[in-house]
Image: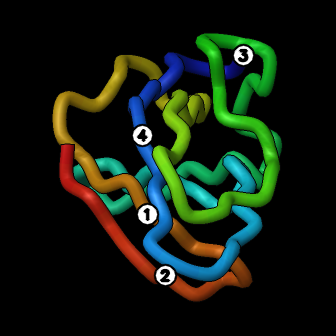
Amino acid sequence: MRGTFERVAVGLQLKSGTVTYDPRDFEVQAADGTVYRASDGHSDADAFAQLTKSTLAPGPGISGNIVIDNTTGPAAEHGLLLYEPGHTVLADWRY
């Protein structure tokens, strides 16, 4: 751990097809624009019931946490959770 964990509860559900998801495809952008990427090693895969890499098919979906270490200190009260597989942002959610 380098700072404070940012923990965001997520749910994923698919209507058709299949998709492989990986918690390292998510990142947190703080209000000041700083980006913290799980793929940079700023995460704890064993903490807080974090999602693990898997393949999702249509149905009830899954839920879990995305946990990223905010290296600057206190947890951000507001920010942006980005879904960025292959370095292309496909979705974002404000928190």
In the shown orientation, is residue 47 left or right of residue 16?
A: right
Between the residue at mark 2 and the residue at mark 4, the CA separation in whole angstroms equals 17 Å
Identify which amino acid the numbered label 1 is placed on: Leu
Give percent across and percent down for residue 27.
Answer: 54, 55
Indicate whether 69 appears above or below 55: above
Residue at figure coordinates x 38%, y 54% from the top left:
81
Identify which amino acid the numbered label 2 is placed on: Val
Identify which amino acid the numbered label 4 is placed on: Val
Give percent across and percent down for residue 49.
Answer: 63, 16
* Callout 2–callout 4 Cβ contact below 8 Å: no
Between the residue at mark 4 and the residue at mark 1, the CA separation in whole angstroms equals 12 Å
Can residue 71 be seen in the rendering of this structure? Answer: no
Can residue 29 be seen in the rendering of this structure? Answer: yes
Q: Which of marks 4 and 3 is in front?
A: 4
Name which quarter of the figure residue 88 lies in: bottom right
Q: Residue 82 carries which label?
A: 1
Between the residue at mark 1 and the residue at mark 2, the CA separation in whole angstroms equals 7 Å
Identify which amino acid the numbered label 3 is placed on: Met
Who comes first in sequence, dot 2 or dot 4? 4
Who comes first in sequence, dot 1 or dot 3? 3
Between the residue at mark 3 and the residue at mark 2, the CA separation in whole angstroms equals 26 Å
Q: Residue 10 carries which label?
A: 4
Between the residue at mark 1 and the residue at mark 3, the CA separation in whole angstroms equals 21 Å
Q: Which mark is residue 89?
A: 2
Q: Nearer the viewer, residue 9 or 41?
A: 9
Dot 3, crowdedness within 10 Å: few (<14), some or many (≥20)?
A: few
